Amino acid sequence: MAGAPQGGRGKLVAGINVTPLVDVVLVLLIIMMVTGTFIGRKLFEAELPTAASGDAVIEVPLVVEVRADRSIWVGAERLDLMGLSQRAKAADGPGGAAATKAIIAADKRVDYGRVAEVIDTLRLAGVAGFGLEIKAGQPPIVGPQ
């Protein structure tokens, strides 16, 4: 322990042992990084549709949110179609590259035409792969209705 006599000579250690402090800070950093992803996803205002099937995202793509009022958001930034095109072409991805994949999180009340406009804008901007974000849920009822 810092400040305690060592070796019987009565000398005091003036230094502070920083190793436990570094350990605690690293653990807190990891906890913040893990919980930050979950908190960020809860900020979406779009009410996502549910589906029983879906794959996990491995690569971090451009995430575009289309809200119920037809507004387009990338993160906390509201964009129009021209702004979305410029944002998709921006070289701010991993390694300074433009986005090549996008995930569209559209509110279930948004009309299909608006989602098609967003996909078309992204495709013209050079984005080749698309995915739709959904909430996991019960499979739809199959059979006569």
Image: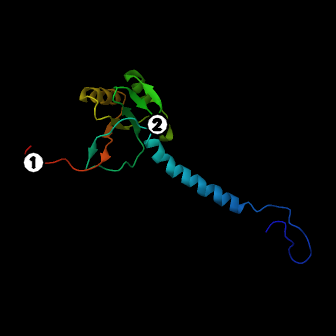
The numbered disc on residue 9 is none
Q: Residue furthest front?
A: 145
Q: Amino acid at mark 1?
A: Gly
Q: Nearer the viewer, residue 64 or 120?
A: 64
x, y percentage for residue 91? 48, 33
What residue is rendered at 50% in x and 41% in y?
95
Residue 18 quadrant: bottom right
Looking at the image, which is closer to me, 39 or 97? 39
Determine the residue positioned at 32% across, 45% down: 135
Instruction: Read off the residue under disc 1.
Output: 143
Q: Secondary structure at mark 1?
A: loop
Q: Which comes before the other along the chain, label 1 or label 2?
A: 2
Mark 2 secondary-structure assignment:
loop
Image quadrant of residue 107? top left
For the image shown, how many numbered marks are present on the structure? 2
Q: Residue at x 33, y 41 (%)?
A: 133
Residue 136 rendering spot, x and y as whole percentages: 30, 49
Q: Quadrant of the C terminus?
A: top left
Q: Is residue 95 above or below residue 23?
A: above
Taking the image as shown, residue 23 lies to the left or right of residue 100, namely right
Q: Quick one: which residue is furthest to the bottom in this view? A: 8
The one of 108 and 2 positioned closer to us in this rendering = 108
Amino acid found under the numbered disc labelled 2: Ala
- Res. 126 image quadrant: top left
Q: Please name which of the two marks, 1 or 2, marks the residue nearer to the observer.
A: 1
Mark 2 — residue? 97
Q: Position of residue 58 (x, y in %)?
A: 39, 49
Q: CA distance from mark 1 to mark 2?
A: 46 Å
Measured as percent of width and height from the top left, residue 12 is found at 88, 67
**Residue closer to the observer: 133 or 120:** 133
Task: Determine whether, in the image, residue 16 is placed left or right of residue 66.
Answer: right
